[in-house]
Amino acid sequence: MAYKAVANSKGNNPNYVEQWVSKVIHFSSQYDSQSWPASCVEGQPRVYPKYGDIAGAWAQKQKDANQFIEIEYEEKIYIEKIEVYETYHAGMVKCIKAKHPNGKFQRLSFKSNVLRIEVDCTVASNWCEIDAVKISGTKFNFALPPSPADITNDLAKLVNNSQYSDVSFNVNGNIFHGHRAIMSVRSEYFRAMFSFDGTSGKNLSATNYDISDQSPPSYESLSKSHEKPIELKDVDERAFSIILHYIYTNKLPQNCQSQVLPKVWRTADRFSLDGLKSLAIFELSSALTIQNVVEVYVDVISALPVIESIKTICENYMQENMAEVVRLPSFTSLPQDMMLELIQKMTEKMKIL
């Protein structure tokens, strides 16, 4: 049984501390010095989650209402939660006090690293056994500055959020909302798009842009108002959604599907997002299986630019699993010249090895 007070979630808060007992400093009695000594409460549980009269937990020799143990922790904290792991005759802890700087044990309201746990053995007319005692709390009684993770989570709330948006994009009929300040500092491509003076000399319509063009047009030439979406042609809407998420969070979304990653890589290449290209390669490599390797290979070579790094990874993967890959319907249905080329590459690598 664990006695718990209300506590904040640990999360990634560096101010939050969890501690196990480092030293027993005093106790009323112990059953013996070998199997059930008071020192058993030091460190993490030895008996829990088992329950019963099991050696490895502190048991009292006297069975009266005045049993106690005083324990110490490495660091003084503002204690928010105490967990007492009782593994036999649970329910006999009657009071927990913390040692005040004045030397007296009081109820918790200050920073401390010494506790006194009082036990009433008359409740069960027997001893109870305590395996471990864990405390949790904060080093300081004030809030620390937000961590980078907090900032990322906050920025994630702005992904495709129309609130305060000052630019929008039309991708295959799907409207995406953005914020020029964020997009421009994250991508040289968008920075150029939003800062050009419109004198590029290209004959572009006001709200249509072909992503295959090497130079981005000016924001002024694309949209005369913040309310008119910029139409991006030859861009996959799933890939653009992932790119927006990366721009704001520096991460891929959790529901990112591997089959769209080649499109993400190519679009990121156009948008000058080298970090996203690396992430796409890593995720795509991690997602390779015997069942999907052929489809991934075809995806990475079927459009320009060819993703050479993934192409090589796929070829090596197919070579390592050649016996199974060559029997796949996805492999046998490849164009004959491509299939023969792959077989030749795989067998050549096997000879080298």
Image (cartoon, helix red, strand yellow):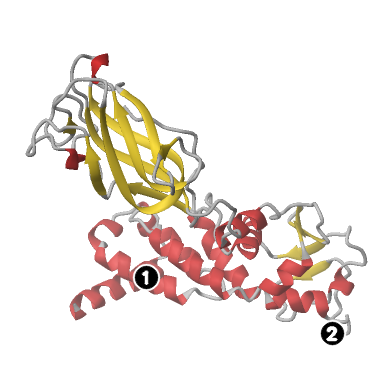
Instruction: Choose top left, top right, bottom left or bottom right for residue 119.
Output: top left
Identify the mark nearer the N-term, 2 or 1: 2
In which quadrant of the rendered image does the N terminus lie? top left
Residue drawn at the location 88% of the way across and 67% of the way down: 223
x and y, in percent, of residue 349 in the image: 25, 76
Image check: 111 left or right of 42? right
Q: Position of residue 86 (x, y in %)?
A: 26, 29
Q: Which mark is residue 200?
A: 2
Label 2, label 1: how far apart the Cα atoms are: 40 Å
Residue at left offset 51%, top offset 54%: 13
Q: Is residue 258 left or right of residue 62?
A: right
Residue at coordinates 31% horizontally, 65% vertically from top-left?
318
- Mark 1 is surrounded, within 10 Å at the Cα level, by few (under 14), some (14 to 19) or many (20 or more) other residues, namely some
Depth check: 146 or 209 in front? 146
- Three-letter residue code for mark 2: Ser
x then y, percent, for residue 170: 78, 58
Disc 2 secondary structure class:
loop
Left or right of 39: which side holds 342? right
Q: Position of residue 297 (x, y in %)?
A: 43, 65
Q: Label 1, on which residue?
A: 313
Please indicate, yes or no, whether residue 353 appears anywhere in the rendered image: yes
**Looking at the picture, does residue 245 appear above or below residue 268?**
above
Along the viewing direction, whichever of 6 and 99 lies nearer the viewer: 99
For label 1, the SS is helix
In the image, is residue 4 above or below residue 123?
below
Q: Amino acid at mark 1?
A: Ile
Residue at image x 40%, y 41%? 104
> Left or right of 182: which side holds 130?
left
Is any part of residue 216 visible from this angle? no
Q: Quadrant of residue 75?
A: bottom left
